[in-house]
């Protein structure tokens, strides 16, 4: 499903920041990785597609962190949890 038409958006309940790669830190890369993924009815995330990446290993870092550590309250249709295709933005900043 996609968000809209009775399908509610999933809500992130745990979303730790992905790690910066040493290569990206040295190159001082900052910006947003935009991913498209399926948020499953159990709150896990899979089936990733990079819509806009940064390279330097940051795309892979974002995907790995989201797949293993992020959890969502699933999207619903008529009150029942459903799998939802969603865009996920991950911002990388150097401090």
Image (cartoon, rainbow, N blue to C red):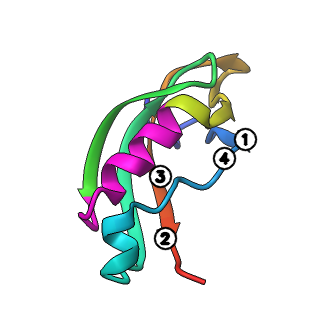
Of badges 1 and 3, nearer the viewer stands 1
Residue at which label 4 appears: 15
Please name the predominant secondary structure of the magenta segment in the image: helix
Q: Secondary structure at mark 1?
A: strand
Residue denoted by label 1? 14
Label 3 vs label 4, nearer the camera:
4
Which mark is on residue 92? 2
Question: Does the magenta run of residues contain 56?
Answer: yes
Q: CA distance from mark 1 to mark 3?
A: 13 Å
The tag on residue 3 is none
Badge 1: residue crowd in 10 Å (few <14, some 14–19, many ≥20): few
Side (left or right) of 1 relative to 70: left
Judge depth for marks 2 and 3 and give the one in front. 2
Q: Is residue 88 above or below residue 78?
A: below
How many neighbours does mark 2 have within 10 angstroms: few (below 14), some (14-19), or many (20 or more)?
some
Say left or right for 61 vs 73. left
Give the extent of the magenta segment. 52-67
Of residue 32 and residue 38, the one placed in the foreground of this image is: 32
Whichever of labels 1 and 2 marks the residue nearer the N terminus, that label is: 1
Label 4: few (<14), some or many (≥20) within 10 Å? few
Looking at the rendered image, the quarter that the N terminus falls into is top left
Q: How many marks?
A: 4
Q: Can residue 89 be found in the magenta stretch?
A: no
Looking at the image, do the residues carrying marks 3 and 4 touch, with CB atoms under 8 Å apart? no
């Amino acid at each position: 499903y996609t968000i809209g038409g009775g399908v509610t958006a999933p809500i992130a309940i745990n979303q730790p920041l992905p790690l910066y790669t040493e290569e990206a830190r040295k190159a001082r890369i900052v910006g947003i990785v935009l991913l498209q993924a399926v948020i499953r009815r159990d709150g896990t995330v899979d089936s990733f597609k990079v819509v806009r990446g940064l390279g330097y290993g940051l795309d892979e870092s974002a995907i790995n962190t989201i797949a293993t550590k992020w959890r969502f309250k699933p999207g619903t249709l008529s009150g029942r949890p459903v799998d939802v295709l969603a865009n996920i933005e991950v911002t990388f900043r150097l401090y």
